[in-house]
Image: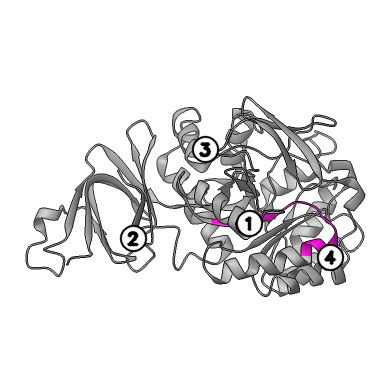
Amino acid sequence: MATAKVLAGAKVVLPTGTVTDGRVIVDGTKIAGSSPRLSNELGGTPFADATTVDLSGHWVVPGFVDMHNHGGGGASFTSGTVEDILKGVHTHRLHGTTTVVASFVTGDMDFLTQRAGLLSELAEQGEIAGIHFEGPFISPCRKGAHDETLLRDPDPAAVRKLIDAARGRAKMVTLATELPGGIDSVRLLAEHGVIAAIGHTDATYEQTVEAIDAGATVATHLFNAMPGLGHRAPGPIAALLEDERITVELINDGTHLHPAALELAFHHKGGRKVAFITDAMDAAGFGDGRYMLGTLEVEVKDSVARLVEGGSIAGSTLTLDRAFKRAATIDELPVEDIVHAISANPAQLLGVYDTVGSLDPGKDADLVVLDEEFELKGVMRKGEWIVEP
């Protein structure tokens, strides 16, 4: 029985550009080929008996890669059971995110090390792509939805404790690098192949430059939880935007960023140094209500998450299919730039671009089907339809 599938007739977004009336050949769990030729030209090839799926009038793009995500479907990556975590992962897969990093919010060090051990097992099983520690090494001045009583300076020994607990599955640590130990911790992370991300920071421009020179490569949800751009004190935003070594995370949900801020980021960074993220919490793909984010209570109303005490924005309820549609229809970004920001760029940062992040032959058959209005119509992961078009 043939296992191959030919997805034909769509606009296919490849690393080299968009192919109209293109095709993607899926053989088992892998992409076997992609080109402008249609399936009726496959006679005499190993895929002559493949099942053809007509996707005329649609887009086919790589599966989305979310490098900053705290949960979804009513489940928390920070505190949920294994069943909860898998539920959250599946929720985001239904919205096109075929690769997800599980992010923690601030917690007690012993709790975080225990959770890191649990999630590292899921990473080893391929359910998640790794672990992101967003806290506890962040600034009390820019804590956002993190428990201030559990914050601590980024002492390298404590940072090392967390990455050791993750058993090689730690992908990123967010730091307020201006705090004592911050620069040494950046160097430690760089030495161990873990992304040092600048975020929840009160750093000056000069302090941010120092952290970048030490090896930081990512800006955690740029513009949020950091000083605003000033004409005399430009702060971290100017340093993060101007340096080609930095990839900036953006939460494109219409709440975290004004469209002009997103445009500014793309103007400075181009499509190759931006990563769309969700920063999603439990309510993503689930609904309004009361939730816990770490130790703090959150109320979600009209899909916006805020702390019950103080009203700070507490992550998002975003899914990446919504971020894609907004980028294409409201922000009017080129589709190729969106695909880089939502798939290729985060995959490269996470060190998984050899298997995901584009529709190149030999990679996992992870892809998303969108209609002409950029509504999600299909999701494939490792050759199997999660959402069948």
In the image, residue 13 lies at what x, y percent?
A: 34, 49
Query: Which comes sooner in the sequence, label 1 or label 4?
Result: 1
Q: Identify the residue position indicated by label 4 in the image.
A: 110
- In the image, what residue occupies the spot 38% across and 62% down? 382
> Looking at numbered disc 1 in the image, what kind of residue is underneath it?
Ala
> Looking at numbered disc 4 in the image, what kind of residue is underneath it?
Asp
Could you tell me which secondary element the residue under label 2 belongs to?
Answer: loop
Look at the image and tell me in which quarter the N terminus lies.
Answer: bottom left
Query: Which comes sooner in the sequence, label 3 or label 2?
Result: 3
Residue range highlighted in magenta:
100-112
In the image, residue 123 lies at what x, y percent?
A: 58, 67
> Looking at numbered disc 3 in the image, what kind of residue is underneath it?
Ala
Position of 3 compared to 121: left or right? left
Answer few, some or many: residues within 10 Å of disc 4's Cα (few below 14, many 20 plus, some between 14 and 19): few
Q: Identify the residue position indicated by label 1 in the image.
A: 102
Position of 10 compared to 312: left or right? left
In the image, residue 331 lies at what x, y percent?
A: 50, 30
Q: Identify the residue position indicated by label 2 in the image.
A: 383
> Looking at numbered disc 2 in the image, what kind of residue is underneath it?
Gly
Q: Which numbered marker is on residue 323?
A: 3
Is residue 5 something one can see in this rendering? yes
Q: Nearer the viewer, residue 330 or 84?
A: 84
